[in-house]
Amino acid sequence: MPVHRPAQSQPSAAAGPRRVPTVLPPARDDVPAVVVAHGTAHLEGLLMIDALLERVRFLRPGLPVRLSFVSKAEPRPDVVLRELAATGAKEVVVLPLFLGSGYHVRHDIPTAVREATKTSALTSAIAGAPAQDRAGRLRVHVARALGPDPMLAQVLAERLGAVCGRLFGTEVVLAAAGSLDQRATADAVAMAGLLAERLGMPVRTAFLTAAEPSTAALLTRLSRRGRPVAVATYLLAEGGYTQRLRDTAALAGLEPGAVRTPRVAAPLGSHDVIARLLLRRYDQTLFG
């Protein structure tokens, strides 16, 4: 039986031998990174985020990494950006610690960047800096959200395996926070597709708030069917949503007609793969 291979174009003699780069460009650590998280009042969640950033610092020694929050915790990203500008930073990479392109990524972060750059330019003008210094004194590069991404599917699969073991014959649900922004909802659905590819089995999507189907309704329905139900927690850290998800699963198992209680995996958390994904977003933003 013949083997079909993709056709390869031959370089012309005039063009000379094709040069293949043998050395990748070195990883940069000269531009500070400002990680922007949602924020939580739960100590365990804050510690989990802090542990994740320690992994980032371990993987990229020398890279200045600052943490900020858009809600429920401080400092705010515009404050951190102004502090970096005051210390003489010329460039900054903002890394959204969000799983989709929802309101915080599309509104809160750009607003913080505008406020910080406007304030730093004003401070420079008051100080009497030359015009060329006042223009673009702080250059801010904003990375895209973490998800959807196959690296997240790897972590979700590991978390599921830790709580359920083998998943054969199991109904798998990816539970996301939910958003009124349809783009964020679409990101979660796309992430369920990537997890399905990773597991080699169907994955349903449900939301804790603002979008349908709701996690409560879906888990209640599935728990009555008799097959095991496993929930992939598509959340970064412990907080109010993770507690709500565990409570929802427990209540679904107590509903009349329920045969099994859904098992809920841990959130993504401080995993080395998440740290590497953050650094990948940093490199992608600087190198294009």
Image: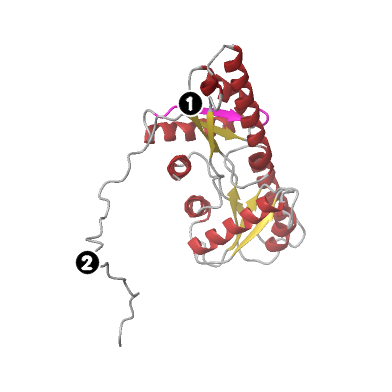
Q: Main secondary structure of the magenta part?
A: loop
Left or right: 108, with 83 as reference point = right
Q: CA distance from mark 2 to mark 1?
A: 46 Å
- Residue 12 placement: quadrant: bottom left
Range drawn in magenta: 63-75
Image quarter of the C terminus? top left
Magenta span contains residue 171: no
Residue 76 visible, this angle: no
Magenta span contains residue 74: yes
Tag nearer the camera, 2 or 1: 2
Residue drawn at 73 percent across, 58 percent down: 213
Pick whichever of labels 2 and 1 is earlier in the sequence.
2
Residue 220 visible, this angle: yes
Residue drawn at 52 percent across, 62 percent down: 167
- Residue 119 placement: quadrant: top right
Q: Which residue is mark 1?
A: 90
